[in-house]
């Protein structure tokens, strides 16, 4: 299946994020969030987004609701204790903006099949070392997760780490050291490897060979993003009201 | 390393029509330096694949398919590379992360990626030792038929076990001057009995199933009964040997099945590393401390008995002169030796040793087997995994073979 080209993907998501930050009406933001959730569901990314929501958005929402709804009991700029409801609405707006923006960025970055990642980065104008750094940044999280798993396995295999997540958390500083040493060591070895095998040039060549982009889908994505932006400006200027 | 220009040139043998030439010699005889020098300085366009197979991968990709494509530089792989992917059995792993496949499969992938670069020649330094006999035959066949135009130069400690004989040039003929001094003393036999000793219990596992999120069915209703002694476990790459080690050591919780110790039901995952200590195949992920001494002390516990055990193991493994060295700064065979000593320093009744002789030459392999026999003679149970027939023959343990997640056959009982 052909997909949204890199530049259009970048512009559409930038416009979408801008629109989310222009909106300051929580009802409109909630509707936008619903639309983003629907798109994430269609793209098969809802599970990953919900994990992000549980890990980041829920704690953020609780913290902001406590700060503005319970402690200051007023939105920024208002006297303390003057508008409890306004404080909670402010917290909701901040959380919804982050939720919408994060959803749009996940749609932009994670909906791409990983084989097309080099093509997207190259399409964004990244070349040479910047290109490899961006490509490496994508691979680094699963790589570190994998190596962390190996370190924990090796510790437990020698009986140095009792079972359970809490035990691992308590010994985190001890577990981080081999991870840090490995990172440095792997970086040096891989720098040599990339140079010896000219992997930078090969990665760029691989990226240049991609031809699965669809201009029509790109135009559709930008149109949808522009529609969202115009709607956000209209709501902000109170052309529409709830 | 100074090369002897009057010595027989391996590339001359390669030019005579042999697609594969081995450089033969013991550990620390300069074989690795020869290969590196050969590739980097003397022969432009030659690729070196080292023994640390995982680090021979780019770290830029998240699937096996992407890794091969990246090395070739195009998603449309040439026929001989895509054919090799199928021949080596990697086609079923194309969507896996390169770090989650087994050690032997990683070794195949690293050589295949080297070939995907379409080099003039390839030098493989101990990278084939982790392959089972079938994969090794396939790989040698592949290098013979579709290898680089200048051929392949290989260093391997299992040359004498290869299914296909290849011409070998002794390293002594290729280098000048005296041999470099080995970084560690030789292994010392006869001292482990006094510092190690226990009465290992018998273990029984019934209908065990275990696996990982992306490969859930690695062990399939595996049943096994282990009495104290030595077991020689073999089997093809990806058969589930390391997964069995993880389950027995309590690192991985099985999805089904039961284990019992001396007839009592046991939940091994509740106390990992207590009954069975697992010595991992890759030493680089199992060395954490700043010095060799700290590494040995890490699992040994405290008190005079622990100190005696550490000192005894250091002496037995020939590590006394490098106790203050950083383990990761040592050459691969010594790192593997430190990792093995650190595993045995943990006072447990059973040891599961994954490829304990990896990177060791024939003489050291035989000595390591004798050392493991001493551990078993002291009352411990030992399960040793290897693809080397020579190692298994030297160990003379009870042979066990795994295939597709099950113990295929118990080939006989010598105890």
Image (cartoon, helix red, strand yellow):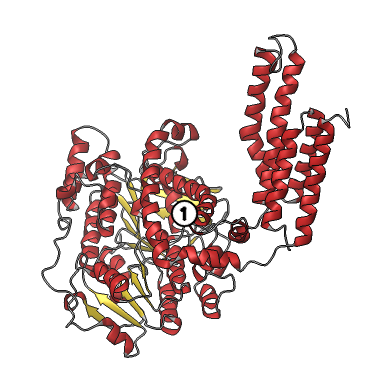
The quadrant of the rendering that contains the N terminus of chain B is bottom left
Left or right, A45 with reference to B340: right
The mark total stands at 1
Q: Residue at x 27, y 35 (%)?
A: B301
Q: Residue B92 in the image: x percent, y percent?
A: 57, 66
The quadrant of the rendering that contains the C terminus of chain B is bottom left
Look at the numbered disc 1 and give the secondary structure of its residue. Answer: helix
Residue B272 sits in which quadrant?
Answer: top left
Check disc 1 and report the residue beneath it: B243
Q: Residue B404 in the image: x percent, y percent?
A: 51, 63
Subunit bearing disc 1: B
User: Is residue B26 positioned above or below B302 on the image?
Assistant: below
User: Is residue B2 positioned above or below A111 on the image?
Assistant: below
Give the camera-side residue of B158 and B353.
B158
Give the camera-side residue of B139 and A21.
A21
Question: Hey, which residue is sitting farthest bottom in the picture?
Answer: B16
Give the camera-side residue of A78 and A65.
A78
């Amino acid at each position: 299946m052909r997909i949204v080209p890199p530049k259009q993907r970048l512009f559409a998501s930038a416009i979408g994020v801008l629109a989310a930050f222009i909106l300051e009406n929580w009802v409109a933001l909630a509707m936008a969030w619903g639309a983003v959730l629907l798109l994430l569901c269609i793209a098969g990314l809802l599970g990953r987004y919900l994990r992000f929501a549980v890990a980041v958005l829920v704690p953020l929402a609780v913290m902001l609701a406590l700060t503005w709804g319970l402690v200051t009991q007023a939105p920024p700029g208002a006297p303390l204790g003057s508008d409890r409801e306004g404080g909670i609405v402010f917290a909701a707006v901040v959380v919804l903006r982050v939720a919408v923006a994060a959803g749009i960025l996940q749609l932009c970055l994670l909906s791409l099949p990983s084989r097309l990642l080099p093509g997207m980065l190259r399409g964004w104008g990244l070349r040479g070392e910047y290109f490899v750094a961006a490509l490496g940044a994508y691979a680094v999280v699963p790589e570190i997760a994998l190596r962390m798993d190996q370190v924990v396995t090796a510790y437990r295999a020698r009986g140095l780490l009792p079972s359970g997540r809490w035990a691992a958390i308590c010994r985190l500083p001890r577990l981080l050291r081999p991870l840090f040493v490995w990172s440095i060591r792997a970086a040096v070895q891989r720098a040599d490897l990339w140079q010896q095998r000219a992997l930078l040039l090969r990665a760029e060549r691989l990226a240049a060979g991609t031809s699965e982009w669809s201009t029509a889908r790109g135009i559709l994505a930008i149109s949808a993003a522009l529609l969202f932006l115009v709607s956000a400006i209209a709501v902000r200027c109170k052309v529409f009201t709830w | 390393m100074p090369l002897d220009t009057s010595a027989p040139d391996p590339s001359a043998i390669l030019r005579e029509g042999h697609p594969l030439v081995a450089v033969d010699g013991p550990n620390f005889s300069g074989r690795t330096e020869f290969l590196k020098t050969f590739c980097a300085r003397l022969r432009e366009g030659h690729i070196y694949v080292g023994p640390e197979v995982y680090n021979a991968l780019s770290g830029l990709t998240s699937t096996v398919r992407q890794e091969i494509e990246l090395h070739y530089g195009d998603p449309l792989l040439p026929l001989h590379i895509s054919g090799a992917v199928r021949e080596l059995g990697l086609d079923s792993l194309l969507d896996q992360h390169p770090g989650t496949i087994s050690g032997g499969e990683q070794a195949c992938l690293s050589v295949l990626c080297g070939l995907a670069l379409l080099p003039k020649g390839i030098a493989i330094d101990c990278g084939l030792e982790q392959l089972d006999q079938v994969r090794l035959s396939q790989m040698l066949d592949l290098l013979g038929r579709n290898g680089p135009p200048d051929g392949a130069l290989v260093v391997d400690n299992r040359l004498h076990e290869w299914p296909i004989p290849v011409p070998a040039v002794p390293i002594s003929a290729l280098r000048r001057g005296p041999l470099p001094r080995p970084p560690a003393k030789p292994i010392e036999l006869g001292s482990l009995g006094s510092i190690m000793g226990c009465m290992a219990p018998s273990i029984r596992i019934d209908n065990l199933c275990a696996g990982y999120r992306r490969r859930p069915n690695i062990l399939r209703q595996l049943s096994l009964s282990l009495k104290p002694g030595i077991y020689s476990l073999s089997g093809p790459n990806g058969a589930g040997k390391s997964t069995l080690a993880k389950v027995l050591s309590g690192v991985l919780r099985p999805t089904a099945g039961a284990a019992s110790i001396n007839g009592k039901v046991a939940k091994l995952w509740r106390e990992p590393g207590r009954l069975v200590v697992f010595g991992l195949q890759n030493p680089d992920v199992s060395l954490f401390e700043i010095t060799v001494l700290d590494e040995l002390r890490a699992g040994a516990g405290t008190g005079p008995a622990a100190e005696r055990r550490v000192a005894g193991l250091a002496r037995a493994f020939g590590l006394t002169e490098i106790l203050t060295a950083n383990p990761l700064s040592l050459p691969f065979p010594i790192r593997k030796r430190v990792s093995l000593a650190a595993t045995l320093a943990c006072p447990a009744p059973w040891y599961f040793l994954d490829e304990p002789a990896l990177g060791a030459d024939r003489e050291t392999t035989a000595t390591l087997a004798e050392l493991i026999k001493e551990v078993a003679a002291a009352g411990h149970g030992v399960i040793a995994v290897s693809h080397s027939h020579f190692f298994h023959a030297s160990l003379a343990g009870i042979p066990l073979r795994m295939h597709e997640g099950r113990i295929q056959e118990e080939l006989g009982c010598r105890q």
